[in-house]
Image (spheres, rainbow, N blue to C red):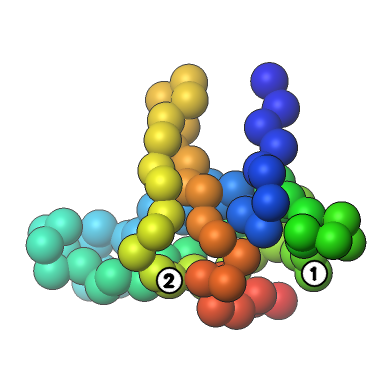
Amino acid sequence: MEIIPIGERVLIKPIKQEEVTKNGIYIPESAQEGRKEGSVVAVGKRDDGSDLPLKQGDHVLYGGYSADTFEIDSETYVFVPYKDILAKIE
């Protein structure tokens, strides 16, 4: 199944944050950093039909409160408006 975002949206597969420190100490979910990081799965287009400057496989940091989370085949994905993409990590 292929999911294609409509409009200026980006489909991201979040990267799970580490639950144990390098020294082996368990970090409870309530104390983990709120950094939102993931891998781009699919990218929509601008309103004028031009491409957004992201591609499948890009590693990004994202923020915002308007992300929609859903699950397909026990995998979690997030739809994020393009304006909430903070940075591309290379």
Q: Is residue 42 above or below residue 88?
A: above
User: Residue 59's x, y, as percent?
Assistant: 63, 64
Q: Earlier in the sequence, mark 1 or mark 2?
A: 1
Q: Is residue 69 above or below residue 29?
A: above
The structure residue drawn at horizontal position 67% and vertical position 58%, both measured from the top left corner, is 8
Q: Is residue 10 above or below residue 72?
A: below
Q: Identify the secondary structure beneath mark 1.
A: loop
Q: CA distance from mark 1 to mark 2?
A: 17 Å
| Nearer to us in this view, 79 or 34 | 79
Q: Does the image show residue 85? A: yes
Residue receiving disc 2: 63
Local crowd size for mark 2, using a 10 Å CA cut-off: few (<14), some (14–19), many (≥20): some
User: Residue 25's x, y, as percent?
Assistant: 15, 66
User: Residue 75's x, y, as percent?
Assistant: 46, 32
Residue receiving disc 1: 53
The structure residue drawn at horizontal position 71% and vertical position 27%, both measured from the top left corner, is 2
User: Residue 26's x, y, as percent?
Assistant: 14, 60
Amino acid found under the numbered disc labelled 2? Gly
Local crowd size for mark 1, using a 10 Å CA cut-off: few (<14), some (14–19), many (≥20): few
Q: Identify the secondary structure beneath mark 2.
A: loop
Determine the image quadrant of residue 82: bottom right
| Nearer to us in this view, 28 or 47 | 47
Quadrant into which the C terminus falls: bottom right
Quadrant into which the N terminus falls: top right
State left or right for residue 67 relative to residue 4: left
The structure residue drawn at horizontal position 64% and vertical position 76%, both measured from the top left corner, is 89
Amino acid found under the numbered disc labelled 1? Pro
| Nearer to us in this view, 42 or 90 | 42
